Image: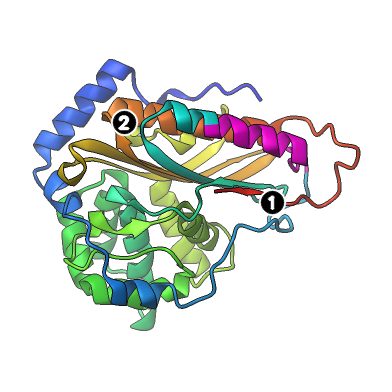
């Protein structure tokens, strides 16, 4: 598929992107402090979140429409793709994990799907879904104020608003209480209450995306529409990462996170979580990374991974039995 990203869905030039990152870091004094606390695992919280049996990323039946395009990856193509991703891993100093599911065909691919990464601002998507869950428990919709704050948090990645909403959620206790309902098995909030230092996995983020994109989760259609509407309207300069899989006319919804971490020598944590929907594909994508030398190279790495995986999924199926169920191979 010829990807020709629209102007409002792609990352700016390397020079502009670097300037944006520097300006945002200076303009938002809470960006580094909120997201850069020392990461200290909390055993009790981890036990709570991992109480469920460990889930993998199995193949599944298409859930949104008949298979009109794309292909299930034959074993040889899957092995070749895994080798290419491993080569990227060996070439780059950063650590990364990626999980992709195509709801249109049932195809899945993952690499390091259960490795844990700091969320940075990707946590804001989880917090918004939990805010909806809390409101539902209280028998109400989000207030006008909460909706306005949610828009600032998701579309513009406002840290101060996120601090306030995390407090309203109940910090770590509220997070843990809702995490089980989302099916998380590898996500742990920071014990000190730093939402940006939440640890998560690509697999858990795809579970969250499935809850938002299908009727399998705890959200009403109205709540799903609200969250997805915000994800589809993020500020143009923040619309990188998952959007690398999009062609002209595709619908893209995402939430990204990025921050340098002093606890990791100033290396950058860069993440992208979201979906891309087109005529022959409906991708759910979570790609997380840590240890990038800078923001720009982190974005480039994520987009390389997303493009490599989705291009392989879209490649014509040359196997003898293209209609047979695929066997998912999870790398490492």
User: Is residue 152 visible to the viewer in this orientation of the structure?
Assistant: yes
- Secondary structure beneath dot 1 equals loop
Mark 2 sits on what residue? 237
Magenta region: which residues?
68-86
- In-image side of 317 versus 201 (left or right): right
Mark 1 sits on what residue? 328
Q: CB under 8 Å between callouts 2 and 1? A: no
- Secondary structure beneath dot 2 equals helix
Q: Quadrant of residue 56?
A: bottom right
Q: Predominant secondary structure in magenta? A: helix
Give the alpha-carbon distance from disc 2 to disc 1, as whole Å: 35 Å
Q: Residue at x 69, y 58 (%)?
A: 63
Q: Residue at x 59, y 29 (%)?
A: 84
Image location (x, y in percent) of residue 279: 68, 38
Q: Quadrant of residue 79?
A: top right
What is the tally of numbered marks visible in this picture?
Answer: 2
Q: Nearer the viewer, residue 110 or 173?
A: 110
Image location (x, y in percent) of residue 300: 40, 26
The mark lying in front, picked from 2 and 1, is: 1
Q: Label 2: how many residues lie within 10 Å, few (<14), some (14-19) or many (20+)?
A: some
Q: Residue at x 72, y 55 (%)?
A: 62
Q: Is residue 76 magenta?
A: yes
Image location (x, y in percent) of residue 161: 18, 56
Name of the residue lying farthest toward the right: 320
User: Is residue 249 visible to the viewer in this orientation of the structure?
Assistant: no
Which of the image's four quarters has the N terminus?
top right
Position above or below: 249 against 204: above
Name of the residue lying farthest toward the bottom: 138
Q: Which mark is residue 94?
A: none
Q: Label 1: how many residues lie within 10 Å, few (<14), some (14-19) or many (20+)?
A: many
């Amino acid at each position: 598929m010829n990807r020709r990203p629209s102007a409002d869905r792609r990352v700016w030039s390397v020079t502009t992107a670097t300037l944006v990152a520097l300006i945002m870091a200076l303009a938002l004094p809470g960006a580094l402090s909120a997201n850069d606390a020392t990461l200290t695992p909390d055993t009790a919280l981890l036990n709570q979140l991992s109480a469920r049996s460990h889930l993998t990323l199995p193949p599944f039946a298409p859930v949104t429409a008949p298979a009109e395009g794309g292909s299930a990856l034959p074993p040889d193509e899957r092995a070749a793709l895994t080798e290419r991703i491993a080569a990227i891993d060996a070439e780059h100093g950063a650590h990364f994990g990626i999980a992709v599911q195509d709801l249109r065909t049932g195809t899945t691919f993952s690499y390091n799907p259960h490795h844990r990464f700091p969320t940075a601002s990707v946590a804001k998507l989880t917090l918004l879904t939990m805010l909806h869950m809390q409101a539902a428990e209280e028998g109400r919709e989000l207030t006008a104020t909460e909706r306005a704050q949610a828009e600032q948090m998701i579309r513009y990645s406002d840290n101060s608003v996120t601090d306030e909403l995390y407090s309203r959620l109940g910090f770590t206790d509220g997070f843990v209480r809702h995490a089980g309902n989302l099916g998380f098995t590898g996500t742990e909030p920071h014990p000190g209450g730093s939402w940006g230092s939440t640890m998560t996995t690509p697999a858990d983020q795809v579970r969250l995306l499935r809850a938002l994109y299908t009727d399998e989760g705890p959200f009403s259609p109205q709540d799903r529409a609200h969250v997805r509407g915000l994800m589809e309207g993020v500020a143009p300069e923040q619309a990188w990462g998952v959007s690398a899989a999009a062609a002209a006319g595709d619908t893209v919804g995402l939430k990204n996170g990025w921050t340098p971490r002093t606890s990791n020598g100033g290396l950058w944590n860069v993440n992208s979580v979201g979906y891309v929907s087109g005529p022959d594909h409906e991708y759910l994508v979570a790609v997380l990374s840590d240890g990038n030398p800078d923001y720009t190279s982190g974005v480039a790495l994520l987009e390389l991974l997303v493009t490599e995986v989705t291009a392989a999924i879209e490649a014509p199926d040359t196997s003898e039995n293209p209609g047979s169920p695929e066997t998912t191979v999870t790398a490492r």
